[in-house]
Amino acid sequence: MTALPLVPATEPVAAESPYRSYVYAYPHKSAYRPFAERPPLADLWRGEDVRALSLYLHIPFCEMRCGFCNLFTRSTPPAEQVAAYLDAFERQARTVAAALPGGIGFARAALGGGTPTYLEADELTRVYDVLESAFGVDLAAVPMSVETSPATATADRLAVLEARGVTRISMGVQSFIDSEAHAAGRPQKRAEVDRALELIRAHTTADLNVDLIYGIDRQDERTWAYSLDTALEHAPEEVYLYPLYVRPLTGLGRRGRSWDDHRLGLYRQGRDHLRERGYEQVSMRMFRRADAPEAQGPDYCCQTDGMVGLGCGARSYTTAAHYSFDYAVGVGQVRSIIADYIGRDAADFARAEVGFLLDGDERRRRHLLQSLLRTEGMAAADYTSRFGTHPREDFPDLFAALDRRGWLADSAAGGGAGRVLLTEEGLAHSDAVGPLFFSDRVNALMAEYEAR
C-alpha cells in the first residue's frame, strides 16, 4: 500500500514547489474535529440518495511499517487483537447497516489498510460473509478492489478473493531494485515481489495495479526506467506513479528544492514511458492500459455519491458530513485508537465521533478538486447544474492564478464553457494545484492539527 500524504498549504515549502499536498480526499482527516454532540448516523444519512454508494473496510494491520508510510496502520499485531478487531468490525457493520435508509445499493467496494491480505484466508472469508450479511449485498456483483503486499499475496488468500469476485488487486511494489526499496524503508526482496505478481496472475482474473515510487535516494533515470519496464512485463491493467513524500512521524527525512526538480523530471519520464507503451493517463498518478476492459457495475460519482466506511481508520461521506474515528500516525497513538475501537459496543457505533460539516462553499471546493485533478477535467454544466454558478465565478482569483501559470486548458477569453481541465503541465503540478482550493477554514484546522 502506498502512503497517501497531505499537508496543510500553510506549511513552509520551496517557492512554486510542485509537491505541496496529495489531494485524495477533501478535506483531509487532519481537518476533522470531535463533534460537540455526537450525531446519530441515522440523522446524518436521512434523506440521502443511497442507491449507488461506495463501501470501504479498513484493515489497520501490516507485516511491516514502510519508512515512507503515514497511513493508519500497525505492524505485526498479536493474533488475538486481529480476532478482536474483526469482532468489532462485525458489530459496527450491523449497527451501521441498521442506521442507513432503505434501498441501499453499492456501486463499488474496497478493502484497504494497512494490508487487508495480512488477514488469513479464513479471516478474509469472514470479512466477506459479514459485509454481505449485514448489508444484504452480493459483493461478487460489485466492482471490488483489494490491496495486498508481496509477502501476503499467497495462493490461499488469493483463492478467497477470486472465489468472492474480486475485480482489482493493487500491490505497492515501489521499486524492483532491492536497494531502492530498502532506501524507501521497505525491506522487501525482489524474489518475493516476482512470486507475488506471478501468483496474482495465476490465481485470479482481477485487474492488477502496481504502485511505483519516484524520488527515492540514489534513484536515477536508468533505474526508474528499469522499474517501469519490469512492471510492464506483468502487463498490469493499471500503474500508479507516486512521488516520494516525507511526513512527520515517518521513517524518512526532509529534502530540498533540488529533490522537487528531480521528482518532477522522473514524473515526466514515467508519464511519457507509459503513454508510449499503450497506457492512458487518468490523473497525475494513475495510468490505465488502453486495451483493458472497463469494470462493469453501477456508476459511482465521487463528487456526489456517498461512502460507507467501516473499521477504525475509515471515513464516511454524506452530502453534508464527513466522519470517522480519531486519526494518528505515531505507533503509540495508532495502537491506542485500535484498542478503543475494539472495546466499543454495538450502540457506540451508532453515532459519529469525529468529522467535518461541509457548507455550500466547501461542497463546491470538494466537487472541483474531485474533478479538476483528473485528465478529463470537469464538465462546467455539471457544476452549474448542481450549484447554479460557473466555477470561475466562484473562484475567480484562483482560476486567474492558474491561467497565469498556463495550467488551465480552458481560456478566460472563451468563458470556460465546456470542460474545465488542466493542461499537461498543470496536471504535472496537481499537488500544487489542489491546495490552492483549500478553504481558509480547512487550512487553519490542518495547521492547528498536532501530528501524533
Image: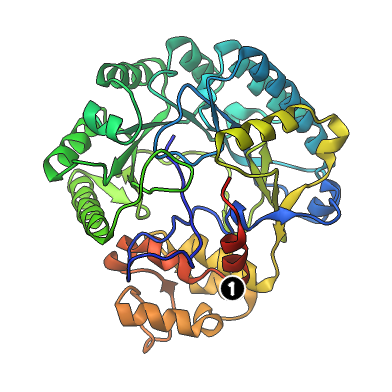
Q: Residue 95's quadrant in the figure?
A: top right
Graded by Cα atoms within 10 Å as few (under 14), some (14 to 19) or many (20 or more), the crowding at tag 1 reads few
Front in this rendered view, residue 136 or 13: 13
Where's residue 100, x and y in %?
80, 43
* Residue 311 seen in the current view: no
Front in this rendered view, residue 255 or 445: 255
Vertically, is 12 above or below 246? below
Which quadrant holds the C terminus? top right
Q: Residue at x 59, y 73 (%)?
A: 440
Q: Residue 298's quadrant in the figure?
A: top right
Q: Residue 357's quadrant in the figure?
A: bottom right
The colour mode here is rainbow
* Residue 317 seen in the current view: yes
Front in this rendered view, residue 189 or 380: 189
Q: Residue at x 69, y 64 (%)?
A: 358
Say whether residue 121 is left or right of residue 339: left
Q: Residue at x 22, y 49 (%)?
A: 275
Vertically, is 322 above or below 141? below
> What kind of residue is marked 1?
Asp
Read off the residue under disc 1.
440
Q: Residue at x 56, y 71 (%)?
A: 383
Where's residue 205, x and y in %?
41, 23
> Which type of secondary structure does the marked residue at label 1 adopt?
helix
Front in this rendered view, residue 396 or 151: 151
Say whether residue 365 is left or right of residue 338: left
Say whether residue 325 is left or right of residue 267: right
Where's residue 250, x and y in %?
45, 41
